[in-house]
Amino acid sequence: MNRYPFIVVEGLDGTGKTTLRKGLFRLYEGLYRVTPLAVLTTNFLAPDVAADLVVGKYQPTPDNQDRYLAALAADKQATAHQLIGPSLPVRPVIADRWLLSELAFFAVKHTRPPKDTYAALTEHLGLVPDLTLVLDITPEAAMARAAARAGDATRPDWDVLAIQAKVRDVYQSVTDAPAAFPALGPVARINAAQDRAAVLRTAWQAIEEYGLLPDLGGTST
């Protein structure tokens, strides 16, 4: 590689995405003296669709799902062009969710096939993660962890066991068919039931196995 990697962390709420992202952040800083850029699945960089992003996520209806999907596509394009692409020559980018979570949302909330959502989000995206790390844990364990977090906001129409079980099913079905969803990039599933140190070690090993670590001289390999 002649640039740093774009790494995505996916998983149910409570699986440890934020903990893993912070761990990867510290490893890059400590070992390579480079500060990664952290981005979210939605970054509100396309201001003309900001209202559709908020309404579509928190008040989803059959009438606004198409506007929400178009808004997500526009926001991801803006994020790719304004944040991720310009950053990769000088530092890694780590995203807290990216495509997989959106495929699950539309499949569960709107019964839209993942392939349809995928086509709409990636048609003009032109950016593929170098690695998608999927933290996997049972919905029961994920919800227990999420509930234990102080001040964590939950949505009664989404953060319930039956819904989260469906979300996990979508994650598994999509990642089981990599040829149908190439814009996810290579996918590595990680057992998130391990302790946080083991999860970080497994993720770092996956990054290394895919040749995504810079050399210790400070340039990417």
Image (tube, rainbow, N blue to C red):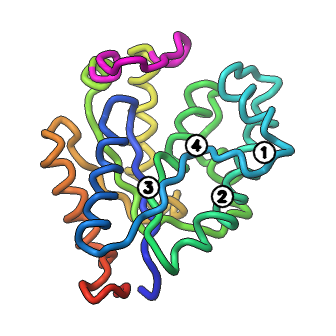
Q: Which residue is mark 2?
A: 79
Q: Which residue is mark 3?
A: 8
Mark earlier in primary sequence (4, 3): 3
Numbered range of the magenta stretch: 145-159
Q: Which residue is mark 1?
A: 70
**What residue lies at 58% left-to-right and 65% top-to-bottom?**
84
User: What amino acid does circle 3 point to?
Assistant: Val
Query: Is 146 contained in the magenta span?
Result: yes
Mark pair 4, 1: CA separation: 15 Å
Mark earlier in primary sequence (2, 3): 3
**What residue lies at 62% left-to-right and 44% top-to-bottom?**
42
Mark pair 1, 3: CA separation: 21 Å
**What residue lies at 73% left-to-right and 64% top-to-bottom?**
124
Q: Nearer the viewer, mark 4 or mark 3?
A: 3
**What residue lies at 35% left-to-right and 54% top-to-bottom?**
133
Q: Which residue is mark 4?
A: 114
Q: The C terminus lies in which quarter of the figure? A: bottom left
Mark earlier in primary sequence (1, 3): 3
Mark pair 2, 4: CA separation: 22 Å
Q: Nearer the viewer, mark 2 or mark 4?
A: 2
In front of the other: 102 or 111:
102
Name the element at disc 2.
Answer: helix
Percent across and percent down for residue 159 are: 46, 18
User: What amino acid does circle 2 point to?
Assistant: Thr
Name the element at disc 1.
Answer: helix
Percent across and percent down for residue 158 are: 52, 18
Mark earlier in primary sequence (4, 1): 1
